[in-house]
Structure formats: C-alpha cells, structure tokens
Image: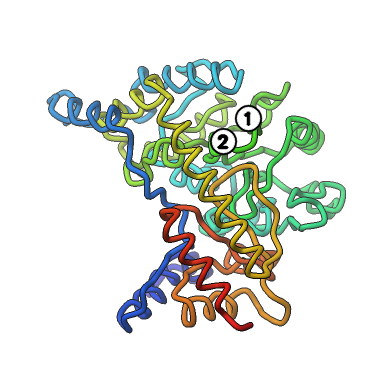
Amino acid sequence: MYAKRITSLPPYLFAEIDERKKKAEDKGIDIIDLSIGDPDLPTPPHVVEAACRAAKNPLNHRYPSYEGMLSFREAVAAWYNHKKHVSLDAEDEVLTLIGSKEGIAHSAFAFLDSGDIALVPNPAYPVYKNATLLANGIPHSVPLTDETEFKPDLDRIDKEVVRKAKIMFLNYPNNPTAATVEKTFFKEIVDFAHDHDIIILHDNPYSELTFDGYEAPSFLAVDGAKEVGIEFNSLSKTYNMTGWRIGYAIGNSELLKGLRLVKTNVDSGAFQAIQAAGIAALTGPQDCVKLDMEIYRERRDILFDGLRSAGMELKKPKATFYLWAKVPSGFLSIQYSMLLLERAGVVVTPGVGFGENGEGFVRFSLCVSKERIKEACERLERLDI
C-alpha cells in the first residue's frame, strides 16, 4: 500500500512520546512534560500585533512569492549582519521557509540522488536522517560522543565514505546534546568541505539561546563558508514562534536556487502576514529575547542543581533549552524514560531516539515553568533507584 521510501522510516520519536504521555494522563497521572522543545513563553506582543495588521490587508490574502517577501529577506540580512557579522545579499542569498524543518527536509531532495551519501551526526535531530531516507539517499552516521564534546571527529570518518559523500548536516548549538562550538571548529568544517567537495547544511535555530556570556557563531561567519554551504535558522526558538512556521535558509546562492526549485514544486510559500510578523520580530525591540534568556537561565540552574541532587551526571549547558544527562548505571535510555513517566509522572526524551549514539542519555527540556521544574526535581529525588 505505502511507498517503500516511507516504510524505511522509524516511528517519529515525539509522536511516540505524545502517545505514551496521553496513556499516563488517562490514568490520572499528573504529568510534567520535560520532553519537547516547544517554548511555553508567548510570542512578543508587537510581533502578534504586526501579524494581525497584515492579516487584514487583502494584498496578503493571495499567493505569496516562492522565495518570500523581499522586505522579510532584507530583515534577515540586516539581522545577520548586526548579530552574526555575516554579509548577505537579500535577493540571492536569503530564502524564506515555512519553518526551518521544511527547508532542511527539502534540501535532501535538492542535493541527493538515489544512493548518494549524507554524513549525518549521531545523535541528532531525526529530520536529517529521515529526509535522507525519503530522498533515497544513504545516511552515514558520524558519531558525536562525550569524549569529543559531541563534535564530529572528521579524521575518523571512513575515507572512502568521505570521498563519496555529497552533503553533511551539522547543528550547533546542538540538539539534543546542548554542545557548543567556536569559530575555529567551523573553520575545520569549511576546510573539510573544500577538500572533499561536500555541501554543508548547518542548522542553527538555537543561535540566540545562550548563557553565561557565550555567543554562538554562525557557520557563515568563517571565510569560505558561503562557497560550500548554507545555514538554516528559524524564528521559532528565538521569538517563541514555533506554531507560526517561519524560517529561512541563507548562504550560497546556487545551493539556494536548488532548494527553491524543490519548494516551487511542493509548496506555495509562507503566508505574507506571518512574514510581516517575522519582520517585526527581527527589526523590533530585542529586550524580549534577553528577558526570555534570563527565564531560561533561571530554569536551567534550577534543573541542573535538581538533577545533580538526584544523582544524575551532566554538564551545565551554555546554550539551547536542553540538558543532556547520563542515565543511571544499569538502565537503557528508554527504560529510564519509562520509569520516570510511570513512577514520577515526568516525561523526558530517551537519547536513543536521536540515534544509537544517544544511548545512555536522556534529554530534559526547559519549556515549563520553574515551579514545575522544581516539582519534577523533587519527584526525581524521591525515587529509590
């Protein structure tokens, strides 16, 4: 009945978590969900107001352009120039997306033929691998381990695989591990891509979710990066706009043309009222972002201290709204996740859901109030494991 390409896909991790959570709720368990990276903080009021005004304009009720409004792309370019010191041509080097996930998935179709190899970090956001499979490509796992601070060891990738590889996915600040990098790492990646003729696809939605003075660099801030790749970003995490579905891809103009060609055949662009909201977010006051980061920092510290008190081993992250913690000895990540759900009513994401190298870890999200985080920590401390 189904195409072979979708039978190769594993069940989507977060859908499974939702199903397990619902069964627990049906039993009357008070659930504290620390599994999904979906901000509980509201979209800034000035962004909502901009969308409402634009939605009333009949000009925005028609089909938008495929590449997005030039005014939105100009706002992206200005934001990147100011925040990341990256110069972009708004017309040729910025492409509007219906959320960055859509662009990431479609990039596999733009750059992979059947049998082409994609270098996919492991553990990682599932879309990188799944999009490769849907495009009939071959995902080659690149381990991210505690020993390498969850960065790929380029020298350990099989040389024959590197020779054949077409694209490489990257994501820093990282989901699920919360690992961070400096510009020197991206310089190594750019040199690697030049040496082996590999397209780099860098996913950067957590670029502004940083703490303790850390500033996340853009991949494109490195000399030569624009020659070998593109970067995806989103307004979802920075401005609490996950449900709005607005993002963008930036960088190499020829690569963006390929992605645009796929998109013109499968979607009709982002609603212009939402692009207007995006302009308001990017060009308006940024105090809302600073306030949100202070809220997340407080939540991070509470959860970090609580997990340490409960006996868990983890490092305090400098970015993202995730904590990546080792499971207690003797447990697999799914076993431990189910134990927390059934005995404590706390939902976390098993690390193995992000790839086999995520085994031995679970991911906690900061997208609930500090009061609920404190309650979750108290429940974990009461567990007799």
Q: Which residue is mark 1?
A: 218
The amino acid sitting under disc 2 is Ser
Q: Nearer the viewer, residue 376 or 280?
A: 376
Can residue 138 be seen from the camera position used here? no
Can residue 20 be seen from the camera position used here? yes
Q: Is residue 290 left or right of residue 142?
A: left
Q: Nearer the viewer, residue 160 or 236?
A: 236
Compared with residue 241, is residue 194 higher up or lower down, i.e. above or below?
Answer: above
The local crowd at label 2, few if under 14, some if 14 to 19, many if 20 or more residues have their Cα within 10 Å, is many
Q: What's the mark number on residue 207?
A: 2
Callout 2: helix, strand or loop? loop
Q: Nearer the viewer, residue 47 or 254?
A: 47
Callout 1: helix, strand or loop? loop
The amino acid sitting under disc 1 is Ser
Residue drawn at x 37%, y 27% as measured from the top left: 281
Compared with residue 98, is residue 313 higher up or lower down, i.e. above or below?
Answer: below
Residue drawn at x 47%, y 69% as measured from the top left: 347
Residue drawn at x 66%, y 53% as measured from the top left: 120
Residue 241 in percent (x, y) is at 36, 40
Q: What's the mark number on residue 21?
A: none
